[in-house]
Image (cartoon, rainbow, N blue to C red):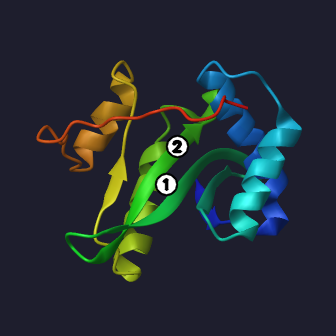
Amino acid sequence: MFEIYQISSTRIDDAAHLFNQYRIFYKMPSHLSSAREFISERLHKKESIVYLAYRKVQPVGFIQIYPSFSSIAMQQTWILNDLFVDSKARRLGCAEKMMTHIHIKAKEKNIFSIKLATATDNHTAKKLYQKLAYQQINNFENYSKSIVKKR
C-alpha cells in the first residue's frame, strides 16, 4: 500500500509540502518556501536523512532523521526528529511502515539506537512507539534552552 524512499534533491518539493504541513500541525505558520529551503539545505549538507512514503503516486508521509553519536557506546545513533503522515493517510499503517523501514536501514548501517521524542498528549504516536518496542527513558531529564527566535 505504501512505498518508502530515501530522498535526494529530486523529491524535495514532495518533502517540503509534507514538512510544511507537519509544522502547521505543531502550530507554526505555513511557509512553504522556507520549508523547501530548510529541507534542501539539510540534504545538501548531508545533515539529515529524509524518507518519504507514497501511496500510489501521492506523497503522504515523511520521516527526518539527524545522525548523531553516543559517546558512551562509541557508535552512531539516529535522532528521529520528525515524523508526519498526511491526514488522508492516517490510520492506514503508514507511520508503522515508515518506522519499520528505518529500523531495517538502521540495522544495515549498524546504527546503535534510534532516539525520538513526542508531545506528551500525542497518544497515537506513543502507542505506535510502544508497539514497536521503544522504551520511555525515565532515568534522564532533558533540558533545552532557546538561543535564537524561531523562524
Closer to the camera, 145 or 43? 145
Residue 18 in view, yes or no: yes
User: At x 26% / y 77%, what residue is drawn?
Assistant: 74
Q: Is 97 on the left or on the right of 59, as rendered?
A: left
Q: Earlier in the sequence, mark 2 or mark 1?
A: 2
The number of numbered badges drawn on the structure is 2
Residue occupied by mark 2: 83
Q: Amino acid at mark 1?
A: Met
User: At x 72% / y 48%, what residue is drawn?
Assistant: 59
Q: Assess whether mark 1 and mark 2 are in contact (beta carbons under 8 angstroms).
A: yes
Q: CA distance from mark 2 to mark 1?
A: 9 Å
Residue 1 in view, yes or no: no
Q: Neighbour class for label 2 at 10 Å: few (<14), some, many (≥20)?
A: many
Residue occupied by mark 1: 98
Q: Position of residue 119 (x, y in %)?
A: 40, 26
Which of the 4 image quarters holds residue 137?
top left
